[in-house]
């Protein structure tokens, strides 16, 4: 069974919950997989800490809560500081480099930045930051197909904003693919996983 735990985090008003909803929809409706989503807000709604947890699986999900996410998306400094210790060893943390400063201390996970806020501003709408990050997540994680992810975006955003959100998604996706092409560790994750599985079976 292939299962991936994901946590999307930031502050209220950034579209954290919508991003998680789109991810779950992409997986369950357009990719034919299983997905669960839970969410949490701080005591104040807008501007306070906010997170959403999504589990993706090829099989039945028996426990809906994320314990050690393989992928953490952080769109605020507070979210990164609070949730990064929970990330699984060797996991992936995706950050908006304009909003999150990552220290030089030794980490048990890999950090990949994107100037998501700048990309959103270049597109003329800072509010599409979450869609830029979702496109970046799609490329970096490999959890869902690009076509399924984009279809879920277009099915979830307000009418009349489809082109803007499509451009935002592609901006993030293209940045992720650029990082993949330039990083040998990210280049072919499926082949690497298959090699590890084959090696393990020989022991």
Image: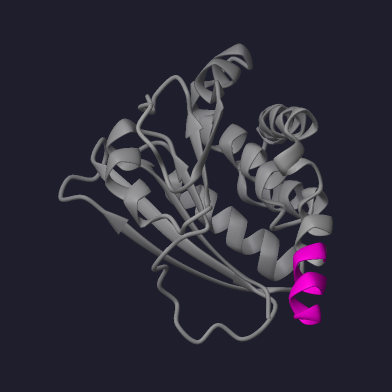
Q: Position of residue 13 (x, y in %)?
A: 36, 37
Q: Main secondary structure of the magenta part?
A: helix
Q: Does residue 30 sit above or below 175 in this rendering?
A: below
The residue depicted at 53 percent of the width and 48 percent of the height is: 19
Task: Judge whether residue 137 can be spotted in this image.
Answer: yes
- Residue 34 falls within the magenta-colored stretch: no
Q: Position of residue 138 (x, y in %)?
A: 68, 46
Q: Does residue 170 sit above or below 93 in this rendering?
A: above
Q: From which residue to which does the magenta span run?
A: 195-203
Q: Position of residue 131 (x, y in %)?
A: 59, 37
Q: Does residue 63 sit above or below 181 in this rendering?
A: below
Q: Does residue 2 sit above or below 80 in this rendering?
A: below
Q: Position of residue 27 (x, y in %)?
A: 68, 64
The residue depicted at 71 percent of the width and 68 percent of the height is: 29
Q: How many marks?
A: 0
The residue depicted at 46 percent of the width and 59 percent of the height is: 88
- The one nearer the camera, 172 or 83, is 83
- The one nearer the camera, 190 or 7, is 190
Quadrant housing the N terminus: bottom right
Residue 121 quadrant = top right
Q: Is residue 44 left or right of residue 162?
A: left
The residue depicted at 35 percent of the width and 32 percent of the height is: 105
The way the protein has been coloured in the rendering is one colour
Task: Judge whether residue 12 can be spotted in this image.
Answer: no
Quadrant housing the C terminus: bottom right
């Amino acid at each position: 069974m292939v299962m991936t735990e994901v946590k999307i985090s930031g502050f209220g008003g950034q579209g954290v919950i919508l991003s998680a909803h789109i991810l779950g929809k992409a997986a369950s409706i357009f990719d034919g997989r299983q997905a669960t989503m839970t969410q949490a807000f701080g005591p104040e709604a807008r501007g306070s800490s906010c997170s959403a947890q999504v589990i993706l699986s090829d099989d039945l999900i028996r426990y809906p809560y994320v314990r050690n996410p393989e992928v953490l998306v952080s769109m605020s400094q507070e979210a990164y500081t609070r949730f990064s210790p929970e990330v699984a060893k060797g996991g992936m943390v995706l950050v908006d480099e304009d909003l999150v400063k990552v220290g030089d201390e030794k980490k048990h996970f890999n950090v990949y930045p994107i100037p998501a806020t700048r990309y959103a501003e270049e597109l003329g709408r800072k509010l599409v930051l979450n869609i830029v990050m979702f496109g970046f997540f799609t490329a970096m994680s490999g959890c869902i197909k690009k076509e399924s992810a984009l279809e879920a975006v277009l099915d979830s955003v307000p009418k009349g904003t489809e082109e803007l959100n499509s451009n935002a998604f592609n901006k993030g996706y293209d940045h992720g693919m650029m990082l993949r092409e330039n990083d040998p560790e990210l280049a072919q994750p499926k082949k690497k996983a298959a090699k590890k599985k084959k090696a393990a079976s020989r022991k």
